[in-house]
Amino acid sequence: MQTVTTLPHLRQAVDELRARDSKRDTLALVPTMGALHEGHLTLVREAARLADHVAVSIFVNPRQFGPNEDLDAYPRQLAEDSAKLKAEGVALLWAPGPEAMYPQGYATNISVSGVSDGLCGADRPGHFDGVATVVCKLFNQVRPDVALFGEKDWQQLAVIRRMARDLDLTQPHVDAIHGVPIVRDPDGLAMSSRNAYLSPEQRAAAATLPRAMDEAIARIRDGQEAAPTLAMLEDELLGAGFSSVDYAELRDADSIALLDGDNGNARLFVAARIGGTRLIDNKAV
Ligand SMILES: Nc1ncnc2c1ncn2[C@@H]1O[C@H](COP(=O)(O)OP(=O)(O)OP(=O)(O)O)[C@@H](O)[C@H]1O
Ligand SMILES: CC(C)(CO)[C@@H](O)C(=O)[O-]
Ligand code: BAL
């Protein structure tokens, strides 16, 4: 595996990979912020199924963190991450520093409206501008044939697909942006780098999130009204030790528009805090 931290080295490494055989080899990109777990590695394995070579980016993107968020505390463990990626057969690790991504004078922002309204877009102002901007840059830097994102960040995936469609991106084309189902711990909690912030007690309580979501979904499928069911879900989380619930909403899975019941394409989205840690999850209704 080659690790590169500057754009000229990245370009050279990508050109070499693509020209490895007589045909033009295909390249998949898995963008991450590092602190890799089985969720990320599942994306990498799926990427290897879809393309000849896999590139992974690790960049803790300052532009997607709010002023009071955990940018400084976000886990950084490049050596460990690098060993995991090497073991998966990843060809290229793109690990730029902030100055390589946003050099002096950087002034451009990409803002996707509609799908980024509500949910995490409402709770984290500017977050999806930061995500869209850095993902567009990563796409232009690596120019992959396919890119993979986790469905844990469902709204993020919708924002990226909208951007790719609206900006007529070709590397990758919107149809080559793949969502990968959420990878969960045995107790159902979605894997997340931020789970590392949880104390053992908080970690045990966090398993209430997917369980309470399953119960709420069962009630909605049974024909119970959405609003009281979601209120009950919030109460259950607060009773289990969550400190607050940022949102518990039914939304259309594609447009992310708010729903007041199951319309056949409904998805349940929840963000809740346990201590200072914000956890998100989503499930089909
Ligand atoms: N449990 C998971 N299942 C599937 N994909 C995941 C999972 N966790 C993360 N991903 C995906 O991995 C990619 C990189 O995510 P990121 O590096 O932010 O990790 P994370 O675990 O989501 O961290 P965070 O705690 O910041 O949410 C994203 O596309 C994300 O959706
Ligand atoms: C897509 C991403 C790598 C952009 O920084 C990030 O939001 C993430 O890890 O989900
Ligand atoms: N996985 C989403 C990145 C973030 O929370 O900033």
Image (spheres, helix red, strand yellow):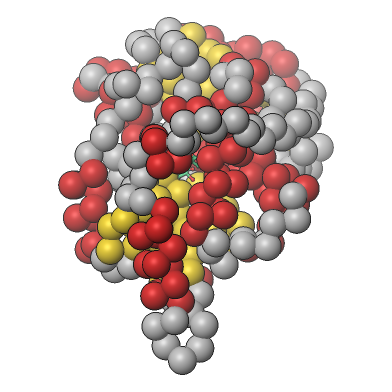
Q: Residue at x 22, y 63 (%)?
A: 87
Whether residue 267 can be seen here: no
Residue 191's spot in the image, x, y percent? Answer: 37, 39
Residue 196's spot in the image, x, y percent? Answer: 27, 29
Residue 59's spot in the image, x, y percent? Answer: 39, 41
Q: Which residue is drawn at 44% across and 81% down?
A: 19
The answer to which quarter of the image holds residue 267 is top right
Q: Which residue is drawn at 69% across and 51% down?
A: 164
Relative horizontal placement of residue 239, taking residue 82 as reference (left or right): right
Relative horizontal placement of residue 229, taking residue 235 as reference (left or right): right
Relative horizontal placement of residue 6, taking residue 116 as reference (left or right): left
* 164, above or below 132, in the image: below
Q: 197 or 244: which is nearer to us?
A: 197
The answer to which quarter of the image holds residue 52 is bottom left
* The N terminus - image quarter: bottom left
Residue 118's spot in the image, x, y percent? Answer: 69, 22
Name of the residue lying farthest toward the bottom: 22
Q: Residue at x 42, y 53 (%)?
A: 7
The answer to which quarter of the image holds residue 232 is top right
* 98, above or below 206, in the image: below
* 143, above or below 209, in the image: below
* The C terminus - image quarter: top right
Q: 282 or 95: which is nearer to us?
A: 95
Whether residue 29 can be seen here: yes
Q: State the count of labels.
A: 0
